[in-house]
Amino acid sequence: MSIGRVAGALGGLIIVAIYLAVTDDLFLTWGNVMNVFRAQSVIFILAIGMTFVILTGGLDLSVASAAGFAGMILGLSFKAGMSPVLAVILCAISGILLGVLNGMLIGMVRISPFVVTLGTMSIYTSVILVVTHGSTVSLFNYPKFDAIQTLANQDAGPFPIILLVIVALYLIAWFVLHRTSFGRAVYAVGSNSEAARLNGLNVPVTLMLVYAVAGLTYALGAIQQDGRLTAAVPIVDPNQMLMVIAAVLIGGMSMRGGEGGLLGTFVGVLFLGVIQNGLTLKGVSAFWQGTVTGLILIAAVGLAVVRETGAMHAVRRRVSGRRKAEATGASVD
Amino acid sequence: MLIAGRPLKRNDPRSGMAAGIGYVPDDRKKAALLLTRTIRPNLSLPWVPFGKLTHFGVLDVRAEKEMARDSCRDFAIRAPSPEFPVVQLSGGNQQKVVLARWFALKPKIVILAEPTRGIDVGAKSEIYGFMQEMAEQGTGIIMISSEMPELLGVADRILVMYQGQLCGEFDPKDVGEEEIAHVVCIGEMKTAGVE
């Protein structure tokens, strides 16, 4: 993994951070920086799954809906009086199953990820609304929910507990991607699925597992989301899907798959968090945040495209030069 | 199909690998290389599903690095290190990566489809050398080629196929290009309906 892909997001992050640090006294306070992580905690977790998906050259538009679904399973489990452990397990299983459904349609039936997840995005959201009749499941004053609330909102020493959890999750995901045969398969399938197949990898199963892993991270994100809201809400925030995909792409990942990684994703999520924080500090209306996120996404991916096509020109020049040399060599013979 | 007297379980790459067959396709960019990655994961691509470098799914990266270094040395892959992007290699060196990944597994049979297409003369003769070496170590090599001089120079036995039909077998010591070309033409005429 080259540092070059992350450089854009990292550079942007540093420039924005320096600007905010200079123009706003509040920005670089410990409390504010930790607030950025807290505000982005759900996105951080969801983006791990999206990283796996986009590494295979796929896309998961159902991320926010699946998280909403798993979060609702968590809420309803608590409401039914289950123990926290059981509720979390049920939530995780529901996330994995939603991912497996995506993955089977994409890997085995071979429908495009865009179409499959566009469909399941709609289905997952609709099922939540049907089950809850559109009403929020409040978890306020539920003693059994305390553990999750603590995890989501309390500090351990100077750090929010959830930040430590996020760092641990990124380390685990890094290990899976770079130190297991499954991780190798993820990169191989994303880089060249035909080569992966011819070298003995099972492409459909790899894809199914990728979406299952993604589903699991959506469930984990959902736990954090419910913890922060002290409720399971049936209405999915349409911005959340955009934020997750944007963060991964801003982090330098190519939509074609096979390159980039978790470091870029982490930086991408943080970058968007700092931008949001900055807008709030500057008193800019929250309505502008979508515009800014969208502009950064287009700029970041646009720069990557320009860089890649620039590189393509160089390669083309070199190849055509070599061909010419070969042609003249042949005519001499 | 029988491999060493035993039938293949299924007609897919996995079963072929399990039976000891390696396959180098003719289009290395489309079907062989991970162009977004470095040399090391390109070399180990078939090693990992082969169970060579894993313990319960966890990669032994140290062993992988060692194998990759050995392959780069044995196959004279010209790159600063195994961590070099494969896309920046010359066609000849890319092809050596693809050959090395299979030869390192010491397969019973390797199928090479047009192994010297689009690479320079120096790398070509190097690749013939590696093929010779591997054959001496006991790997059976099936080379698919449409270049007659190459076939006559490299092969111990030449089988001519036309549209899936076997239409001639030659010993390269006894024949020249004309005879083989003749058989190819006949095959062509037969399928065209000219007797």
Image: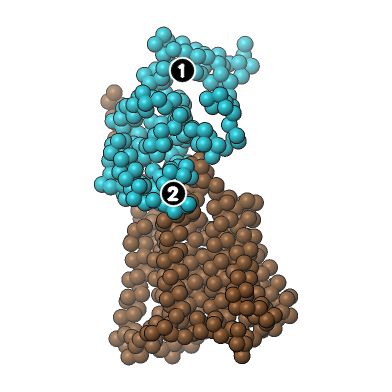
Chain colours: A brown, B cyan
In the depicted structure, whether residue A276 falls above or below residue A193? below
Given the image, on which type of amino acid does mark 1 rest? Ile
Q: Please tell me the numbered disc located at residue B191.
A: none
Between residue B10 and residue A256, name the one nearer to us: B10
- Left-right relation of B112 to A136: left
Image quarter of the N terminus of chain B? top right
Between residue B30 and residue A203, name the one nearer to us: A203
Residue at image location 51% in from the left, 65% down from the top:
A49
Measuring from the top left, give residue A268's x and y in whole percent.
42, 70
Pointer 2 and pointer 1 on the same chain = yes
Q: Please tell me the numbered disc located at residue B158.
A: 1
Chain letter of mark 1 equals B
Describe the element under mark 1 as helix, strand or loop. strand
Measuring from the top left, give residue A196's x and y in whole percent.
49, 45
For the residues labelled 2 and 1, the Cα–Cα distance comes to: 39 Å
Residue at image location 50% in from the left, 14% down from the top:
B169
Between residue B143 and residue B183, name the one nearer to us: B143
Measuring from the top left, give residue A76's x and y in whole percent.
67, 78
Residue at image location 39% in from the left, 66% down from the top:
A263
* Res A59 visible: no
Measuring from the top left, give residue A269's x and y in whole percent.
44, 73
Image quarter of the C terminus of chain B? top right
Label 2 Cα neighbours within 10 Å, binned few <14 / some 14-19 / many ≥20: some
Label located before the other in sequence (2 or 1):
2
Given the image, on which type of amino acid does mark 2 rest? Thr
Determine which residue is flagged by label 2. Answer: B54
Identity of the residue furthest to the top in this view:
B174
Q: Quadrant of residue A321?
A: top left
Q: Quadrant of residue A103?
A: bottom right
Q: How many marks?
A: 2
